[in-house]
Image: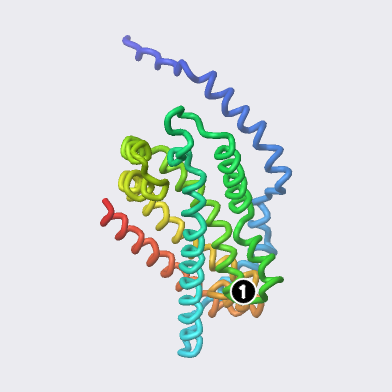
Amino acid sequence: MLTAPPLPRDPAWRGRLITTAVILIVLWPMLVQAEFKPWILWDAQSLAATWNFLSSFIPPAHTPEFLQLVLVSSWETIAMATAGMALAMLGAIPLTLLVTERLSISRIGSGQVSPLAAALRHGVRSLLVLLRSVPELVWALLLVRIVGLGPTAGVIAIALTYCGMLGKVYAEILESSDASACNALLNNGSGRLAALLYGALPESAAELVSYTIYRWECAIRGSVVMGFVGAGGLGQRMDESMKMMAGGELATMLMVFVLLVAGADAVSAMLRRRLA
């Protein structure tokens, strides 16, 4: 009687087993520290509260006055995100010009950046780290205390955080691009701005624009979140409806929010296709 040959043993099973054990050993204290208790969701009291809350979503609010209010708030959210991104780019572009080592004139000839230029570049990098280290929600919380409730706090918060993000990523994209055109311009007496516009940008334009569009999508989502701390827009209306337990209004605004993000994604995809 013929017997089936034994299945071959995975030669890497010990390594995979050890890796899994190490991950669990490292992850478990973090879950305990974070008080991660998903079984609470299945508690009878939690299930009853969830059902009562979700059942209030039907029917969604659809009165003309409320829909007009949602439309105005949605436009305010888009305007907040777009204005914040515009201000962020105004700050990020000159900072990128300073922080990108490839555009340094002092390295021409010796190939080494002068100490003064290196110190300036390090200071600008530290500023970019500071700006992007503080989330836009925290900036919004601080700015609401300074400028009061409304979209102004949200616009400034997005501008500060996204300036740090854009400046860092812009510099990394430019540093990783082909340096031949940029070096040729600098070696022949070109200024930093001309080297950026005619040497570095043509090589990296598609990637730079693609990342900028992606950040604009993130800014729209962030604008809604900042509305919960009083920065205006759709998020502030959602916060008010949640406090009043108006599930129908919340359902309508959630649907509008999904459509808003889907529309931003569609615009982003269209622009990326044109760039490609």
Is residue 22 visible in this depiction of the protein?
yes
**Residue at 41%, 69% in the rendered image:** 259
Q: Give percent across and percent down for residue 177.
A: 37, 39
Query: How many other residues sit within 10 Å of disc 1, few (<14), some (14-19) or many (≥20)?
Result: some
**Residue at 51%, 78% in the rendered image:** 73
Q: Give percent across and percent down for residue 104.
A: 46, 40
Q: Quadrant of the N terminus?
A: top left
Name the residue at the top extreme: 1
- As rendered, which of 229 and 163 lies closer to the eye? 163
Q: Give percent across and percent down for residue 241.
A: 60, 78
**Residue at 59%, 41% in the rendered image:** 122
Q: Secondary structure beneath disc 1?
A: helix
Query: How many callouts does the rendering have?
Result: 1
| Display colour scheme | rainbow
Q: Quadrant of residue 50?
A: bottom right
| 133 to 76, vertically: above or below | above
According to the picture, the residue beneath numbered tag 1 turns out to be: 239
Q: Amino acid at mark 1?
A: Asp
- As rendered, which of 205 and 142 lies closer to the eye? 205
- As rendered, which of 172 and 144 lies closer to the eye? 172
Quick check: 269 left or right of 27?
left
| 68 to 205, vertically: above or below | below
**Residue at 28%, 54% in the rendered image:** 275
Q: Give percent across and percent down for residue 105.
A: 45, 39
Is residue 238 visible in this depiction of the protein?
no
| 152 to 126, vertically: above or below | below
- As rendered, which of 239 and 176 lies closer to the eye? 176
